[in-house]
Image (cartoon, grey):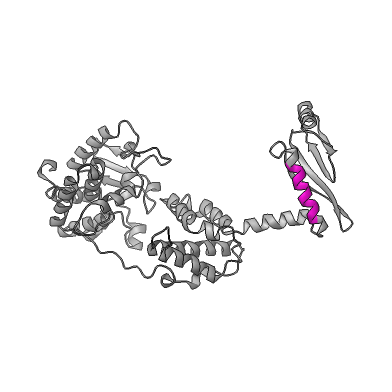
Amino acid sequence: MLTEAQLKSIIKKAAPVRGIGDKDGLFFSLTKSGYASFKFRYQINGRRAIITIGPYPTISLKEARQKAVALRHQLANDIDPAMEKRRAEHQARQTLDAVFEHYFETIIESRYSHAERLKRLYEMNLKKPLGKRSISEINGLEISDVLQKIKKGTRTKAPRPSIANKSLYLLKALFKHAVKLDLIRHNLALSFTAMDAGGEERPKDTYLNEKQIKQFFDIAEAAGTAFSRDNYLATCLLFCTATRKMELLGAKWEEFDFDELLWTIPAERTKPRREFLVPLSPQVIVWLDELKIRACGSEYVFPARKQSRIPHVYHDTLNHAFKNLNLPFALAPHDIRRTTRTLLAKLGVSDQVAEICLNHKLPKMQHIYNKYSFLPEKREALLMLSETFCKCLPKEEQ
């Protein structure tokens, strides 16, 4: 029988070993390149075969012997260990976890501006109940149960109808991806609609008029440290740049040209995946100068406030800050874009220029053939927007 001392001696000599037996089919080998491993030799149905147990010393001699015992049990039940290993590997490639991993790496990671959010959605809601299941074996009742638990909540989790709808959308995408990989023949999740998950969601129509904007900032200022200065400035910048929340909160200082009064958002950080130029008004420059001091040398305009793997402010931070304000109306950060779009229309800005200010895609043929940047028009529109907005702020901020 082998000992740990023998194995260490063999490796130290570095001489290739085809096979040194231990007992009952277990043996040790060492290749010319220095790869040491345990293997198991057996015979089934008159056929000899060898299966690799694993590398040494990742797997100890004691663990290798335990695995060899398990393999002998398979043989006693007329199960071919090599075939069983291949079956298990094939099964592992067909789990929902494996499908999500392939979908994330090949489709999402390089194209989705907030890929980590989708990964978190999967890990928080679908991985535990369905992740280890073969996608070909997941049935409609299982999908329904998972969606209903998300929708209705549990003892430890509040009802989340919106997350149920997002989870259904993700399941549809994963089953479609599995069809593409030839793991299943049809997309079972397509049979489900929003009514089977969180219910139909009505598009939000919240926006603030100028009186409400003033009211918001009066309340935000009165909240003191409960609504931090960074939150205050971020909100002001969202109103005056008409950008998306994470385009701002994830911004780096290198994106800003203070000489040209221009902010260049890289394509990989925009929803349409194209570079976007944002003209900066004089008041925006004043707020950015203050943020530069507050950033304390960070490369990010809004650096993370706590130790975190994400170097900038988290995407939920501003949402929570809004919810904690005692507002007489409901408001979320994304509603600011609807408000800015409405104000641009009120200021007489053309629909085309206003849509471009929000980095919305133009109608298909215009998007393909019209490559004009509209930078002068955007600069004029955002300057008017900024001037109108600043009139709604407390006097000391104007």
Residue at image position (33%, 58%) is 361
303 versus 107 height, above or below: above
Could you say where residue 205 lies in the image, as x and y percent from the top left? Answer: 25, 64
- Quadrant (top left, top right, bottom left, bottom right) of the N terminus: top right
Residue 349 visible? The answer is no
Residue 71 belongs to the span the image colors magenta: yes
Say which quarter of the image contains residue 177. Answer: bottom right
Q: Looking at this view, is 358 or 24 the one in front?
A: 24
Residue at image position (42%, 63%) is 153
Could you say where residue 158 lies in the image, as x and y percent from the top left? Answer: 38, 60
The dominant secondary structure in magenta is helix
Residue at image position (24%, 42%) is 228
Q: Which residue extends farthest top? A: 13
Q: Which residue extends farthest front? A: 155
Residue 136 visible? The answer is yes
Could you say where residue 229 lies in the image, as x and y percent from the top left? Answer: 23, 41
Q: Is residue 391 left or right of residue 270?
A: left
Residue 17 belongs to the span the image colors magenta: no
Q: Is residue 195 left or right of residue 354?
A: right
Q: Which residue extends farthest left? A: 395
Q: Which residue extends farthest right? A: 46
- Which range of residues does the magenta coloring cover? 63-74
Q: Is residue 285 left or right of residue 276?
A: left
- Quadrant (top left, top right, bottom left, bottom right) of the C terminus: top left
177 versus 289 height, above or below: below
Could you say where residue 387 lies in the image, as x and y percent from the top left? Answer: 14, 48
